[in-house]
Image (cartoon, rainbow, N blue to C red):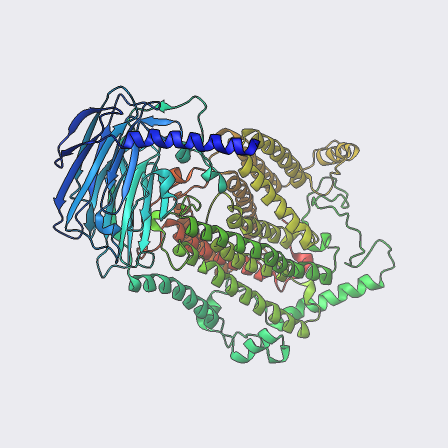
Amino acid sequence: MYRLYYCFCMVVLINIKYIRAESLWSTQALNQTATFNVPYYGQVDNRNPIAYHFTRQLNTFYDGAVRLTVGSVDASEEEPILIIVKRQRTVRSWQLPLIMEENHGYSFFSRTLCPLHNHASTEIPLAGSDEFYVEIFSVSSTRLSYSLMVATFPGFSVSHLPNFELRVSPSEPQYVHYRMQPATNRVVVKVNATVGDTYCSYLSIQSVRCPVGDLEADLRLDGRYQTVTSRAAIEVTRAQFPSGEFYIVVLVHTRDDDCTESRGLFSLLQRHSDAKGTVYHAPRYKTVNVTVIESLDAEGYILATVVPVLIFLGFFILSVVLLQTGPRTWRGIFCTDLSRVTLPTAEEKWGIAALFEKSITGKDIPSLWDPDNYEASNSKLAQMVRKLRASSDPNVQLMTESAPKTVNLTGFDSTDGQPGALTLLHMADINRKSASLIKQTSREYGLTLITVFIFYSLPVLQLVMTHQGLLVVTGNEDICYYNFSCANTVGVLSDFNHILSNVGYVLLGLLFILLVRRKSIFTSKLRQTVPSLDEYGIPSQIGLFYGMGMALTMEGVMSACYHVCPSYNNFQFDTSFMYLIAGLLLLKLYHARHPDVLPQSYAAYALFAGFILIAVVGVVSRHIGYWIAFSVIHGIVTVVLFLQILFVGYLEWSFAGVRKGMKEAFATKRGERMKIPTSRIVLSTLILLTNLLFVISGPLLRPYDFASHLLFILQANLLIYASFYVGMKMMDPDERISRASCLYFFLALPAWGVGMYYFTRGLSNWELSAAKSREGNRECFFFEFYDEHDVWHMCSAIGLFFTFMMLLTLDDDLATVTRDQITVF
């Protein structure tokens, strides 16, 4: 019984509502023939609805777009005015006041009525005239005033390369119909705000069909869109719109949050609500200049993509040719067949190659591949080894893994009876690890890095392709932070030029690996003739060089993955291997004069991973407290590093050890003050001042994002130590810098200069909102396909390669020198 009673009541209520609605619609509306472009004013209530009849002839296929504007200062949420437009194939309705975003009210609105031909279908033919009714009524018992005007829109359909202005507001969106020329395959739609450039707005590209999504909630359902403050750009291809026609839609947001707040990937879809009820706004008018320009055609795309690749490939081939290595030797290099390998001789080299084997002062540098250059020292070394083996002194030990590691690295020796006398420290004095152990530890750097890269790159590729697919499916171009003014689409990739420009990293990294492989095989071949080869020159660093080449190649791959969809969510993909490269360069330079200081590869890579973790937390937190905490820790580490460099070798890190070490460092038994090497004072002071500058400027200025700040710290310390290393080498009378190393340096220098100039241009910034980031977008200028960041990719790849080559050849003059004659810096 209860259920029957409930159903009966519901039927009665529904019938009452139906009868009330029927009585409202049964009220005969006052029909009035109206004219386009003429304003109409009137009053309406629940008993006096009014209908305006508009009609006109369609002269061309693209006629039919009209603009409807309605306003009322009397209407309210409790007593609104309803507007219905009845056309041949569509019915649209609105109410005044217009409520947007649930709590933003507007007392007037203006809409473009979609042209009739965009409603056309094959079953129902179009009429030759545009005839429709605009009905205005209200449920209010009091008369509400209103204004109405329906105007023609002669500039609705545009073609070729238009340049026009649109004036929009939240309640007055606008859109136009654009038609590509038959021979055009891609265009770029650009918007620049001339008035109201701080207001948040939207640019949308939609297919030509009705109804058009000219409100924020509707534009997300079709096409592609971007948030805009002052500028935006969207590339449109004929593959996306086969007919070559599309709508360009511009509207202003009711609030500016989406354009000012930097948000994560999914938070872009979050909406705000206001608990204070409906707020009626003054008009937020924005005037934008819309420009459509043609992008590169197919021939231009092919030329722009092929030429840089051919340049790098040509350099690769030219470098291989200049090595003057025959096919038989190359087969031996690739197959590790030493019987096929022939070491280069002075007679076979070209004259220009011999020229670069001299030092910068013109002195000859012995060829490291000539066994005869090792004979004189070999006999002397053999005698030394025999004496060591025959010695009965228990304190004398060979350089093995089990030898003691506590040595005096300071260069101060009092065995001559003169306390505080300054003596030169040589590599043999501090080398306690065997050559085989050093070689094995170095070799692991390349092998471990391959494993790290495989496990790191696969999820990275999956993630960025998912982001790219999400952009394509949803049309939300705020997901990825491109330089939209120079983002060239190829297939599903929206920014192909920034992916292709990384080819230099990959090819030059592979070339460097090839050169290291050649040197490694030649060294193995030479060892057959010179068995004691491991006692000459600096310790084996082949594994470190392999790691450097692989890191350069992997940087290209990871940078390309990052640029598939650059954003706040994947910024670390672009910088991870930059930290790795900087760390490997520092390790290579320090290990060259400190052979025992080479940590296991897993320990070194764990340290680099720690840098990446610190950078990620710093970027995600964005809090000044994290900057301060990091700077405090950085300052403490800097002081410790300063003391370690200054007093390395006799200052133990304990309270008693520090007291004892300080006494020994600054005073002898006679009360005489001990001399500290000037070079050590200069190096430690430079490192101290530079790092303290970063410690102070980081939290105060915060000039860059935290990841870049950390990378610049590594690069600054690398630059200081590299300059110190080269300077000490130039001041040592027994060492020489080859012309080849100088050539590589002078080739790297302009590449780094040009690259850093373009790197600081700031074309996009994922720390800002997508709209704010687009304010820095700039046009393509290189082949009309590449922008400044692409040039940075190419130049930095060249700069890194020549930097690697300089380090690879920097100590070639020491290859035939025994380690007891090589000075420790």
Write down the quadrant of residue 638 in the picture. Answer: top right
In the picture shown, does residue 506 fall above or below 267? below
Quadrant of res 813: bottom right
Say which of 83 and 195 sits in front.
Answer: 83
Query: Most extreme residue toward the top, as rendered?
Result: 142
**Closer to us: 259 or 117:** 117
* Residue 266: % across, % down: 49, 41
Which residue is the extreme one toward the front? 1
Q: Residue at x 30, y 59 (%)?
A: 242
Image coords of residue 164 (percent x, y): 20, 42
196 with respect to 436 (left or right): left
x and y percentages locating residue 497 in the rendered image? 39, 56
The answer to whether residue 351 is above or below residue 551 is below
Which is more toward the observer, 480 or 317?
A: 480
Q: Is residue 161 left or right of residue 357?
A: left
Residue at 13% in and 37% down: 36
Horizontal and vertical percent position of residue 689: 55, 35
In this rendering, position of residue 337 left or right of residue 742: right
**Can residue 288 be spotted in the picture?**
no
Q: From this viewpoint, is residue 305 visible?
A: yes
**Front position in the image: 129 or 196:** 129
Q: Up-down: is 559 above or below 282?
A: below
